[in-house]
């Protein structure tokens, strides 16, 4: 599987494992150092670890940040902290980030800040509020438990946990801003 495909899967799945150079800053397992958020050094500068190796293609993807635009950053921070059972790795006005397994970062940005950033060159994200604009697909060992936690945290169920044709048990719900939250796991094999 190509690196670009792995990066795309990580972005869509939110927790696919990317064992690539640089994910763990020296770790060959891709493990994340707990000392600082992935991709950031003090002052929120891009991580310089990508430039440390003279053999690395400077255009190769180092890690994936997947951002969703929300109406209320604080409400979404509480929702995703509850669902993911994680504390944000970054939480400042204008951006909340959660460090997911495999090095992926889920970012939460206020629609109003994005409208200011993009100006008139892109549609205002708030015009699509409530319309599914992204799907966050989380692969976990116990999808029933995580789906129940998402519903208890305020998600609205779209489809219960069912076997899907692609080989996962998956449940679908909407987060408070209408983004699709898919929670999936392997279909248990009977007799193995």
Image (spheres, rainbow, N blue to C red):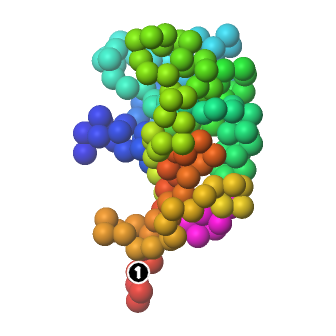
Identify the image quadrant of the C terminus.
bottom left
Q: Is residue 147 magenta?
A: yes
Q: Secondary structure at mark 1?
A: loop
* Residue 38 placement (x, y as % from top left): 58, 28
Residue 107, percent from left and from top: 58, 31
Is any atom of residue 13 visible in this view? yes
Q: Residue at x 68, y 13 (%)?
A: 42
Magenta span of residues: 143-149
Location of the N terminus (image quadrant) = top left
Judging depth in this view, the residue of 1 and 142 nearest the camera is 142
Q: Main secondary structure of the magenta part?
A: helix
In-image side of 44 versus 67 (left or right): right
Q: Residue at x 33, y 23 (%)?
A: 60
Asked if residue 20 lies left or right of residue 117, the reply is left
Q: Which residue is mark 1?
A: 189
Front-most of 183 and 157?
157
In the picture, residue 11 is in which quadrant? Answer: top left
Please report the residue visible at 44 percent of the width from the left and 69 percent of the height from the top: 169
Image check: 188 left or right of 34? Answer: left
Q: Residue furthest left?
A: 1
């Amino acid at each position: 599987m190509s690196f670009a495909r792995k990066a795309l899967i990580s972005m869509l799945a939110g927790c696919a494992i990317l064992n690539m150079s640089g994910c763990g800053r020296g770790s060959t397992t891709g493990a994340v150092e707990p000392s600082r958020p992935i991709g950031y050094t003090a002052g929120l500068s891009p991580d310089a670890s990508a430039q440390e190796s003279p053999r690395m293609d400077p255009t190769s993807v180092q890690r994936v940040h997947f951002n969703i635009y929300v109406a209320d950053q604080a409400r979404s921070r509480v929702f995703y902290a509850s669902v993911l059972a994680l504390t944000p790795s970054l939480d400042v006005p204008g951006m909340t980030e959660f460090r997911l397994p495999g090095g992926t970062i889920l970012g939460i940005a206020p629609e109003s800040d994005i409208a200011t950033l993009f100006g008139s060159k892109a549609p205002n994200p708030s015009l699509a509020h409530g319309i599914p604009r992204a799907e966050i697909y989380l692969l976990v060992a116990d999808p029933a438990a995580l789906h129940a936690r998402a519903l208890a945290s305020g998600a609205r169920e779209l489809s219960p946990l069912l076997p899907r044709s692609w080989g996962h048990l998956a449940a679908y719900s909407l987060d408070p801003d209408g983004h699709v939250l898919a929670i999936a796991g392997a279909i248990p094999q009977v007799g193995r």
